[in-house]
């Protein structure tokens, strides 16, 4: 059985006026150490699926197993979740922010703490432990948020458009950093994005989602040549443009279906 | 001329203009103070205003000195300050706790919503007579007045700020398996400190109102008692003196809250 197994997930949002079907029969498997992207237009339910995997709320029906254990109600299950913005707590110092997860999970022994602080150094953030998030630049803050996420040693990393609020140069640099870090730690990751290029450059497999209701339209494996490269190098490889064109056309066809 | 010298000169000029403005502001503030008290004294002496009703700064000052030497002023003052500080703290703490309860249980907050609106709209000082009968004409009922006047508005304002905390902060905590009380401690409460501080500033004024009205009603001790007593025996020097002292001490309390603000909100 796969590392992360998602079976027949349906999800419907209810409000007084309507019931909106957000996800329709989603099934997919992710192997350990794999990097998978959910790509699609807004409203295709990709963030909903990520939140369900994160255990933020249960799906209307269907089940998810990580490492052969159901996600809900598993206390040892640590996930790393990164959002569009860093969401570092502005009233906590960087050190307090980084060790927050450890504190909440009651693992704040000196050894884990020093490991967490070492992550900061690995990410090129030195001597800022006592500073407040406001004193850091956007890229530095997102790197600190990555350190906070990895500090609890999560089994799986969920990335919800974590690069979308950054300027282009910072975004490219951070993509390389995340990709390299995940390889070093051998982490499984799921990235939600609407950026075709980003999904090709970073992942091993891409799921293209269609909207209304959210469903998987097609899966694209990323060629091995691209996977072995860093995201920045992958962007200048000829295969990158080929795959980009393929996915672009597929997205266009989705839109025309939607219009009729 | 080198540009660096030029920048230095300009900076010096800028600093000098800042200093000039600051001095001008201070001068005007002092002028208003002197003109106000000068005009009050003069008009009272020349009987442009009735000195019996409006008193005069010199009479108030003399009374101040007498009251200090016989020690009565200090005993009245300490009682009032004690009641106000306690009422203020109780009102703020209870209000914040009530807000926390409402945040904890969204259902309870829906149920209580109309009652909060009614309680907030009602003039709390009207409860004074009931409080005094229920708790006795003592310190307790005056402190209760000081607290009750600010507790509901504190609850409403602080609860609103609890609800406006960015839900993404809670999402971050939830992925770390945080319980609801941990979410409150790590995100909701610290994110609301600026709002709590600004309600403190409002509550300083409200508690003085509650306590002075309480002392009017109980008529035993304190600055409120001095005012009502002065009014009954038609000694308006006493009334004015009490007013002046209230103004000074309310200001001191306000400044202390600002000091707390600077201590509590470090990252601003």
Image: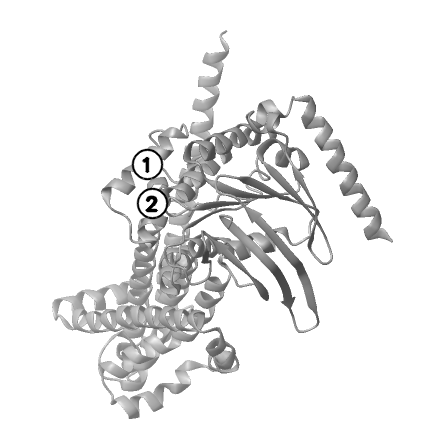
- Marked residue chain, label 2: A
Task: Pick the residue in front: B53 or B48.
Answer: B53
Q: Quadrant of residue A127?
A: top left
Contact between marks 1 and 2 (CB within 8 A): the answer is yes
All told, the count of numbered labels is: 2
Residue tagged by mark 2?
Answer: A99
Task: Pick the residue in front: B159 or A192.
Answer: A192
Residue tagged by mark 1?
Answer: A117
Residue B257 in the image: state x and y as whole percent.
Answer: 33, 57
**Against A81, is A129 above or below?**
above
Which secondary structure lies at badge 2? loop
Side (left or right) of A249 relative to A120: right
Residue B112 disc label: none
Side (left or right) of B40 relative to A52: left
Residue A226 in the image: state x and y as whole percent.
Answer: 61, 27
Which secondary structure lies at badge 1? helix
Q: Is residue A167 visible?
A: no
- Marked residue chain, label 1: A
Q: State which tag comes first along the sequence, 1 or 2.
A: 2
Q: Quadrant of residue A95?
A: top left
């Amino acid at each position: 059985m796969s590392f992360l197994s998602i079976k027949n997930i349906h999800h419907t949002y209810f409000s007084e006026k309507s019931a909106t079907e957000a996800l329709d029969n989603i099934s997919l498997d992710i192997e350990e150490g794999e990097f998978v992207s959910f790509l699609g237009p807004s409203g295709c339910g990709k963030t909903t699926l990520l939140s369900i995997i994160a255990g933020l709320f249960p799906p209307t029906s269907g089940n998810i197993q990580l490492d052969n254990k159901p996600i809900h109600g598993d206390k040892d299950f640590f996930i790393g979740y990164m959002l569009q913005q860093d969401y570092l707590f502005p009233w906590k110092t960087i050190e307090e922010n980084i060790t927050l997860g450890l504190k909440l999970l009651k693992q704040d022994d000196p050894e884990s703490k020093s490991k967490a602080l070492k992550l900061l150094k690995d990410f090129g953030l030195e001597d800022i432990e006592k500073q407040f998030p406001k004193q850091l630049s956007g890229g530095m803050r997102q790197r600190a948020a990555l350190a906070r996420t990895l500090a609890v040693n999560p089994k799986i990393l969920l990335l919800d458009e974590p690069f979308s609020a950054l300027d282009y140069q910072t975004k490219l640099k951070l993509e390389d950093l995340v990709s390299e870090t995940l390889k070093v730690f051998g982490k499984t990751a799921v990235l939600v994005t609407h950026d075709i290029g980003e999904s090709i450059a970073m992942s091993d497999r891409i799921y293209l989602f269609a909207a209304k209701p959210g469903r998987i339209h097609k899966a694209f494996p990323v060629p091995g040549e691209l996977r072995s490269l860093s995201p920045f190098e992958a962007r200048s490889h000829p295969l990158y443009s080929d795959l980009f064109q393929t996915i672009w056309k597929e997205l266009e066809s989705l839109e025309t279906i939607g219009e009729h | 001329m080198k540009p660096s010298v030029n920048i230095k000169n300009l900076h010096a000029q800028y600093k000098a203009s800042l200093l000039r403005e600051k001095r001008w502001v201070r001068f005007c503030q002092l002028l208003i103070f002197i003109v106000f008290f000068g005009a009050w004294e003069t008009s009272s002496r020349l009987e442009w205003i009735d000195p019996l009703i409006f008193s005069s700064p010199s009479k108030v000052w003399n009374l101040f000195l007498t009251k200090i030497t016989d020690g009565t002023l200090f005993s009245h003052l300490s009682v009032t300050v004690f009641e106000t500080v306690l009422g203020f703290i109780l009102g703020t703490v209870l209000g914040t706790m009530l807000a926390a309860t409402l945040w904890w249980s969204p259902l309870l907050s829906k149920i209580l919503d109309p009652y909060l609106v009614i309680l907030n709209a009602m003039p709390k000082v009207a409860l004074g007579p009931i409080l005094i009968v229920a708790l006795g004409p003592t310190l307790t009922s005056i402190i209760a007045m000081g607290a009750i006047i600010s507790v509901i508005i504190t609850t409403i304002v602080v609860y609103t700020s609890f609800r406006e905390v960015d839900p993404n902060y809670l999402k971050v905590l939830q992925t770390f398996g945080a319980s609801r009380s941990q979410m409150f401690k790590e995100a909701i409460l610290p994110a609301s400190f600026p709002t709590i501080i600004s309600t403190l500033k409002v509550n300083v004024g409200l508690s003085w109102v509650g306590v002075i009205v309480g002392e009017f009603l109980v008529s035993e001790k304190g600055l409120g008692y001095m005012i009502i007593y002065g009014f009954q025996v038609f000694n308006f020097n006493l009334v004015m003196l009490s007013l002046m002292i209230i103004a000074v001490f309310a200001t001191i309390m306000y400044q202390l809250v600002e000091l707390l603000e600077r201590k509590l909100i470090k990252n601003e």
